[in-house]
Amino acid sequence: MATALPAVMSRAAAAQARPSVIARWLIAIAALVFAMIVVGGITRLTESGLSITEWKPVSGTLPPLSQADWTAEFDRYQATPQYQQVSGPAGMTLGDFQFIYLWEWVHRLIGRLIGVAFALPLLWFAARRAIPRGYGWRLAALFALGGFQGALGWYMVQSGLVNRTEVSHFRLSAHLLSALLIFSGCIWTALDLRFLAHTGEDRPARLTGFAIAALAALGIQLLLGAWVAGLRAGQVANTWPLMNDRFLPNGIDWSNGALFAVTHDPFLIHFLHRWWAWFVVGLLVLFARRVKAAGGKRASTAIHATFGTQILLGIATVMTGVALALAVAHQAVGALLLAATVWGAHVVGGRMVQHR
């Protein structure tokens, strides 16, 4: 009788688990993170990120509501190097400031919404014992990573408030990549939970060596893309495939060494971003074949469709001198390409686990 009791309790806990509901919730969270990534791209391209010079987690939820409030916010922005050296000399008006302020405010508002949309259901699922065994730590880790992401965002903004007219491209890339990590983690965990809900078998997928290689190569490309954005490197050349009539462009500053050039020079980073992309494409073509062979035809198609669209958008972005709509779409499809690759990696990793 004593030995049977834990088994009964275990079955009761399993009966209360709601893997399909939690999977749908995580996909909704991933969609919100995707929206934040897109708005973050707009914020970067419109130079909106430094318009809000203070971090007020609660009171900052509301935008300025009176003319006096707007004037006070504008006064604070006017004390920044960005205004004094860039926006002010360009003739920024209060109306111009309101435009960039509202983009940054929406970006932060989505971040707050994600925090609430994650924390409250997580507490509810935990209280109802609806979280399947072994998944509580994953959800807690994703929530903690979300908190880190918010702190990292403010750390990024601080880098542009003193002695700089823009944020650090290193902090910008860390902020973007941590968001993409949360995005990927939500998708991967949701896929594991969907498998559990459909089969009743708790067999989380595992990353294979080829999947790790594909994701790592794509991660490097996303990092380079963030550096291109942070350094405005997309604007150093508006021709393709050559950069200003040369394969390797003039203007690369090697005076501080190759490592410094690779991490700081806009000409070289732009060059690396556009040509590393073809290595990533080749690797993803091979990876997509493995995904299809593992039974993931739809995931394979998604990988091909997104990297094809991404290449075309990247070329168009360059040739239009970084047109806002195209550049935002380029960042958005980059996130979708990551989602498709994660999906494919889960298909392959799931098939491997099932055949053990």
Image: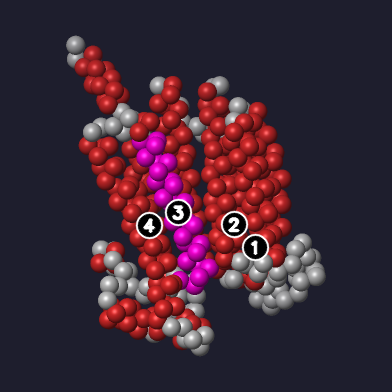
* Label 1 element class: helix
* Label 4 element class: helix
* Label 2 element class: helix
Residue shown at 65% from the left, 56% from the top: 313
CA–CA distance between discs 3 and 4?
Answer: 8 Å
Contact, CB < 8 Å: mark 2 with mark 1? yes
| Residue type, label 1 | Thr
CA–CA distance between discs 4 and 2?
Answer: 20 Å
Q: Which residue is mark 1?
A: 317
Quadrant in the picture for the N terminus: top left
| Precedes in sequence: disc 4 or disc 1 | 4
Q: Tell me, for residue 330, which label it has, or none.
A: 2
Q: In the picture, residue 231 is in which quadrant? A: bottom right
First to last magenta residue range = 22-48
Quadrant in the picture for the C terminus: top right
Contact, CB < 8 Å: mark 3 with mark 1? no
Q: Which residue is mark 3?
A: 35
| Residue type, label 4 | Ile
Closer-to-camera residue (160/26)? 26
Position of residue 14 measured from the top left corner of the image (x, y, whole percent): 30, 24
In the displayed structure image, the side of residue 130 where residue 236 appears, left or right: right
Residue 227 visible: no
